[in-house]
């Protein structure tokens, strides 16, 4: 029966695009793992969160899949010394805003930061939520933000069919439909295997320009 046994194990592995490696090494599997009941799935976006989340994952009594981008292994940032834990299943508001909510996770969230900086100069303030854990999903943080901004853009480095952004879209329409002033937009990779060509790869991945375009679309600008 559920709950009779503890399985405290953590599996670490790469996720999403890793540059010019074509289809073999540029796949995002966190939504696949999140589909399994009982698994917890973590996808950090920065060194500080990675430390706190990994420590919490190691101490968790359930199996945890810890997905990370190979392209972020060289990232540098301040990390708390000593014991530092971030609860699993708790999203983080990385940027406060009033006009639109942007939900993302993993390394692709950097494109949201770039877009928010540009949009701020135009008087558009984006609220950016970093999920950090995709299962369990902190839908409350998303719903609370949408109730404030009334608009939602989801940025995810995964194929467009059957992913985390699809689940978020469902949860928001279920719990906060009357608060939406525009249809939800989700930004994903192209619905093809990752290309090798750097020119095609740039078109395949969503970027800050795509985020800016999506934000202005939900704002009817």
Image (tube, helix red, strand yellow):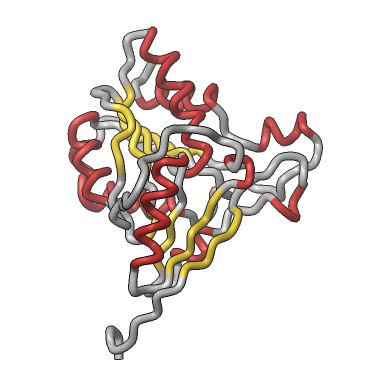
Which quarter of the picture shows residue 127? top left
Q: What residue appears at the point 24 percent right and 31 percent down from the top-left corner?
A: 150
| Residue 113 vertical placement versus 197 (above, below) | above
Residue 149 drawn above or below residue 170 = above
Give the quadrant of the C terminus: top left
Where in the figure is residue 162, as x and y percent of width and height?
Answer: 50, 57
| Residue 156 x %, y % | 49, 43
Where residue 48 sits, quadrant-wise, is top left
| Residue depicted at 69% across the width and 31% down the height | 202
Q: Nearer the viewer, residue 66 or 167?
A: 66
Tell me where residue 210 appears, x and y as whole percent: 53, 27
The residue sitting at 31% across, 28% down in the picture is: 95
Q: Residue furthest right?
A: 197
User: Is 67 located above or below residue 112 in the figure?
Assistant: below
- The answer to whether 155 appears left or right of 202 in the picture is left
How many marks can you see?
0
Residue 142 image point, x, y percent: 27, 43
Foreground pick, 220 / 203: 203
Left or right of residue 165, residue 76 in this image: right
Q: Residue at x 63, y 46 (%)?
A: 70
Of residues 217 and 116, the one nearer the viewer is: 116
The quarter in which the N terminus is drawn is: bottom left
107 displayed left or right of 100: right
Residue that extends furthest to the front in the rendered view of this protein: 82
């Amino acid at each position: 029966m559920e709950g009779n046994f503890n399985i405290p194990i953590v599996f670490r592995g790469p996720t999403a695009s890793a540059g010019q490696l074509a289809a073999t090494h540029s796949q995002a599997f966190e939504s696949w793992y999140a589909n399994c009941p009982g698994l917890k799935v973590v996808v950090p976006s920065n060194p500080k969160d990675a430390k706190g989340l990994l420590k919490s994952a190691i101490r968790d009594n359930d199996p945890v899949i810890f997905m990370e981008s190979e392209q972020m292994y060289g990232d540098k940032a301040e990390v708390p010394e000593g014991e530092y834990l971030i609860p699993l299943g708790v999203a983080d508001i990385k940027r406060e805003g009033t006009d639109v909510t942007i939900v993302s996770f993993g390394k692709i969230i950097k494109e949201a930061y770039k877009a928010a900086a540009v949009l701020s100069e135009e008087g558009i303030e984006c609220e950016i939520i970093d999920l950090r854990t995709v299962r369990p999903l902190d839908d409350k943080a998303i719903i609370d933000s949408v109730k404030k901004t009334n608009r939602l853009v989801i940025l995810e480095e995964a194929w467009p069919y059957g992913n985390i952004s699809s689940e978020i879209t469902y949860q928001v329409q279920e719990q906060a439909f009357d608060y939406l002033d525009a249809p939800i937009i989700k930004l994903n990779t192209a619905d093809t295997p990752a290309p090798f060509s750097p020119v095609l790869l740039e078109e395949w991945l969503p970027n800050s320009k795509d985020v800016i375009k999506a934000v202005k679309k939900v704002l009817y600008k």
